[in-house]
Amino acid sequence: MRTRSGRLARGSLLRRVPAVVLALALAACGSGADPGSGPGSGGAGSGGAGRAAGKVTLRLAWWGSDSRHAYTQKIIDLFEAKHPDIVVDPDYGNFDDYWNKLATGIAGGNAPDVLQQDTKYLRDYAERGAMADLSPYLGKEIAVADLDPVVATSGRVGDKTYGLPTGVNAYAVVADPAAFAAARVPLPDDATWTWERFTSVAASITKGSPKGVYGVQDPGPVDITLEVFAGQRGERLFTPDGRPGLSKATLTAYYTMLAGLVASGAEPPPSVSVEIAPAGVDRSLVATGQGAMAMFWTNQLGALAKAAGKELTLLRLPGDSPTSGTYYKPAMFWSVNARTAHPRESAMLLDFLLNDPEAARLTLSDRGLPANLVRRKAVVGSLGTADQVAARFLEKLRPTIGATPALPPKGSGKISGTVVKKTNEQILFKRLTPEQAADTFLRQAASALKR
């Protein structure tokens, strides 16, 4: 007999596999799905799907923390209680191991039936035929009427739906009111401040603070800062058909702004910024009391406040136009393996994860503020203080948010992981002028997206 501890133990045994396997696995999927391998085919090759004692067995895969593993197991138990003819086996691990294992599973025909997907990878997997088109199940096995319309279709590629969002986040300025007060700088009016005002405020905080405390953490290593900046000018990192979407003028203006943060002393010296950039939430300037502002996703506010040991607040990103550039980002997606032997049951499980009230109560905001608006309203009162602040902030943003960008194309990971970071470092150390940095970005981005 299966025990909960036994299932969890099996789910946590992940092998490290070279990252290059991802490309090999996706190539094994082919340029398109086998006509007989999609939803409804009942074909072989499902990740662990089979029948035991007349029951359908599905495998559910996700990445995350120990707390996510624990509550997701409770959701599985609830689903099985309501669907006694379906058995769900958990399969989980940390972020890096998850993608390595998924790649080898797809290549070997042993991928999970239902799985978490990430914005950066969903389109690539979908275009290779590895993810199922969920369209036949929408409004039937999968209820979608209550999904936030702003992100409900964010998992589409063309006219097909390959993922449904678990929840929403937004990029914001996380501010420490105590650091502002100590520097005798008032909190800005975030409805009207410009990038020039942002730089001025941050520089004033540095000047009014003890040595080693800065106005803002360098925002340049993260591609979302550039995405929002470009959105304020009517541009996006990528066009809907997967091509570079930024003009040289926008990139030059962006790198001029970043150079101004360094020159004014608004942010730390370049060597410090480079060291902090990969350190994550716990070692960020705001979390360690060394800075008044930093840019993070709204769902990270709780972890930042806990690390800082004080209350923090959220501010809208500055801008130079009436368009905010900010958008609701799907925190992650639920998807279905294109080769699952049980597409209908997989759709039912996906529906439960998205829409069941008990599942929402257990998940709260861990996978983003729920995409289901009814469930979102129901859980807000149960959220912690920081998450309630984030929920109110997201609602405040709603009237001004822009459309969620199209799923990024293959090659986008190199742009966000290498091109954006390296070009930013060249600006920090004054190795490139803003104009040169713009040319460098455009050349390297075009190379990364070549197919």
Image (tube, helix red, strand yellow):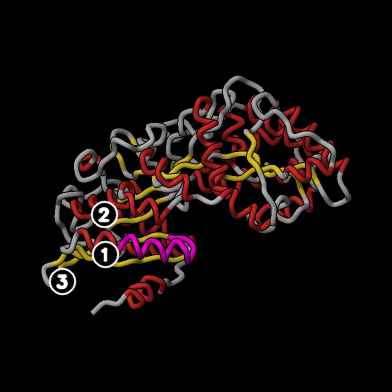
Quadrant housing the N terminus: bottom left
Q: Quadrant of the C terminus?
A: top left
Would you call the spot at circle 2 few (<14 residues within 10 Å), some (14-19), or many (20 or more)? many
- Relative vertical location of residue 44 with respect to residue 198 in this rendering, above or below: below
Q: Residue at x 25, y 52 (%)?
A: 338
Q: Which residue is mark 1?
A: 88
At numbered mark 2, what does the secondary structure look like: helix, strand or loop?
A: helix
Amino acid, disc 3: Ala
Asked whether the viewer can see residue 218, the reply is no
Of the pair 82 and 341, the residue shown nearer to us: 82
Dot 2 or dot 3, earlier in sequence: 3
Above or below: residue 320 compared with residue 378: above
**Residue 297: x percent and y percent?**
57, 44
User: Which segment did they paint magenta?
Assistant: 63-76
Look at the image and say whether residue 257 sits in the magenta stretch. Answer: no
* Residue 257 on image: x %, y %: 73, 32
